[in-house]
Amino acid sequence: MIEERFDAIVVGAGMAGNAAALTMAKRGIKVLQLERGEYSGSKNVHSAVMHADALAELIPDFRVDAPLERHLVEQRFWMLDDCSRIGLRYHFDDFNDGRPNRYTIIRAHFDKWFSSKVREAGATVLCQTTVTELVQNRRGRVIGVRTDRQDGIIRADVVVLAEGVNGLLGTRARLRERPNPDQVALAVTEMHFLPRKAIEDRFNLRGDEGIVIEAAGAISRAMTGIAFIYVNKECISLGIGCLVSELQRTRETPYGLLDRFKRHPSVVPLIDGSKIEEYSAHLIPKGGYNTIPRLHGKGWVVVGDAAQPKNAIAREGANVAMKSGRIAAEAIFLVKSRGDLKKSDSLSLYKKMLDESFEHAKKYKVMPALLHAQPQNFLLTYPQLISKAMQNFARVNSTRQAEKSTLNPSIAWSWTGVFSDVFRLPRAF
Amino acid sequence: MHNVVCVKQVPDSAQIRVHPVTNTIMRQGVPTIINPYDLFALEAALELRDKFGGEITVLTMGPPSAEDSLRKALTFGADRAVLLTDRCFAGADTLATTYALATAIRKIGKEYGSPDLIFTGKQTIDGDTAQVGPGIAKRLSVLQLTYVAKIRALDFTARTIEAERRSEGGVQVLRTRLPCLITMLEATNQIRRGAMTDALRAARAPIVKWSAQDAHVEDISKCGLRGSPTVVKRVFAPSSRAEKAVLVESAEQPAEALLDAVFKHQPKLEADLAALAVCDL
């Protein structure tokens, strides 16, 4: 056992772990951060959308040296039928000023930079060190961690679990339950490299302007899922995510879905001639507020994906994770400065602070259930329906009346469904 | 005993990408590692310390970011790390590199005790020259054993070392006097997993940083680009070769089938041979 004691041990160096370690270290707490990868970000090949506000709360001058890709000036939403799309495009030119609001990032680069800030703040960061077990005393209080290194038990007053969506340590220690397949989405992504100029031409961008596209509809084969395209400087990250339970049920393969998305006529011209460099799969918690599991106990808290605080709308993941890490750190600081760390229920302060700050997250709380109950409607029937409606509107049609009415009776019938769901959707939002 | 291990931070060649458009090597974002051969050298030094005690100093020359590699070396259990970093060292070929490293090793000798063994890897995976180890030995006027696969014995009182050296014809067992320089091959000694105590120490230990002046480099013109007669004219990704092996199948007349296949790809050869045959007649 190591003689040295720490105030806090953070397990994991992703968004939540880095945010927690940084915040605590800045507050003068003696922090040890353990990461199993070779460096922070080494296990991550995703792109993400970073909210400037959330990052600025941690590192106010991040724009000086953070590896940001493009600042977002446009958000598109596509409703996809098999060969058509209906798009919504929101362009915000005022985000083109000196302090843009959102950026695309490549996590592998970003996390490395983030980790360097954690070190600068004074935390001890150890990579290539896997935490194998939480060490508990006889009364069930977590008093430290065991690692895969020799003489590897290290003690601390509090352990912050930022170990990702699987949350192995917490479940192994019987502190929390395993996430259910219907609370977890599997996302597969690919990085498509293209020359900068080609990207800017295809997406109509100037300089470092960026764009995000989110797509739903027939591509996910009636499963609850969303596809996305993030535009970086010299590559496009494109992927699709679906609930694990539905992949199990339909026996669709994730790469099959991704392949279908890539072959969609709306996507083909965007990635034409690109070179695929990376392919990855990643689990994402998708429970929404209602399924947040137990977040704290005696001597431990859970942050980030492990805590599943993400709301049902996919893209906020990294930011919400970061926020939960920061709030946990603030709570630990408050509890510690009161000298209450050893008290059994003191860390419930974290849950309380999280609840307050995620007040808005509650509004999404029934969204997954709503989408889940009738995914065919939302993802197959409605896109077809709307597509047909648009077609009738847009196409100069010389076909005979008889052919026109080939509209599937069940589709026609579900117009009523549209109205009832349209009514429920804003309420879910 | 005091052993010095020279390591180099190199790009992880497994993860180097060629830019799909410009066809140049993309260095940006490529993770760096300790040259794999240097890890065998470090492990050999660690095993000697396990038996005989003493200290290990790890030395590298490179940009400030090479500190990462030194920290990793400390994680494995090295006692001290020295980073030789100065703008004037940039662009060095093996001649200039050995000059700087030899000077630094002399200074290490003065500061921390003169080394009994100096280790390097056989070669680096980015330069592939295998010249730096022997170059250091020559400049320091110490004996050298290159391509060592295993250290068989070390007699500290008699100050001799016995090692297995792999050569093209087989294995040579050689004995020589200390101090000496050893360049290590990939060997049976996998680098160990550092203990938690070492890992914690490594994360926080100060790295000794020396500029050219700190290391008592006397002649700056022998350093870096100025001291390097080697010129890199071009860096490029090799194009894949078009030639492929062809399987010629013929049960009846294999020799003729083979010749036909050869002539098909080399029509000129057929004409030349035909001309020769005519001359012979």
Image (spheres, rainbow, N blue to C red):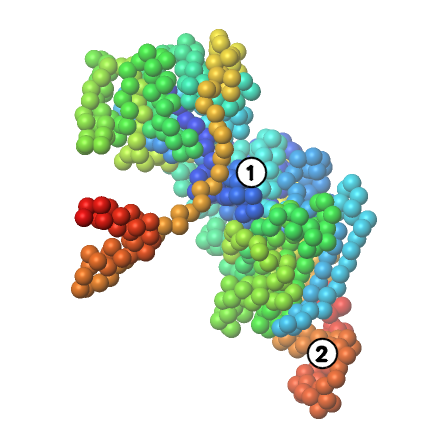
Q: Quadrant of residue B28?
A: top right
Marks 1 and 2 belong to one chain: no
Residue projecting furthest to the bottom: A402
Read off the chain for label 1. Answer: B
Is residue B253 shown left or right of residue A406? Answer: left
Vertical relation: A336 (above or below) B219: below
Percent across and percent down for residue B195 are 39, 33
Residue B192 shows in the view: yes
Crowd around label 1: few <14 · some 14–19 · many ≥20 (10 Å): few
Which image quarter is the N terminus of chain B in?
A: top left
Q: Name the amino acid, label 2.
A: Lys
Q: Residue at x 51, y 43 (%)?
A: B18
Vertical relation: A24 (above or below) A243: above
Read off the chain for label 2. Answer: A
Q: Residue at x 71, y 41 (%)?
A: A56
Q: Name the amino acid, label 1.
A: Gln
Q: Helix, strand or loop at disc 2?
A: helix
Camera-side residue of A235 and B91: B91
Res. B28 mark: 1
Percent across and percent down for residue A192 are 57, 53
Q: Residue at x 24, y 56 (%)?
A: B258
Is residue A368 shown left or right of residue A184? Answer: right
Residue projecting furthest to the right: A94
Res. A388 mark: 2
Q: Helix, strand or loop at disc 1?
A: loop
Query: Alpha-carbon distance for marks 1 and 2?
Result: 48 Å
Camera-side residue of B19 and A321: B19
Percent across and percent down for residue B139 are 37, 13
Camera-side residue of A314 and A325: A314
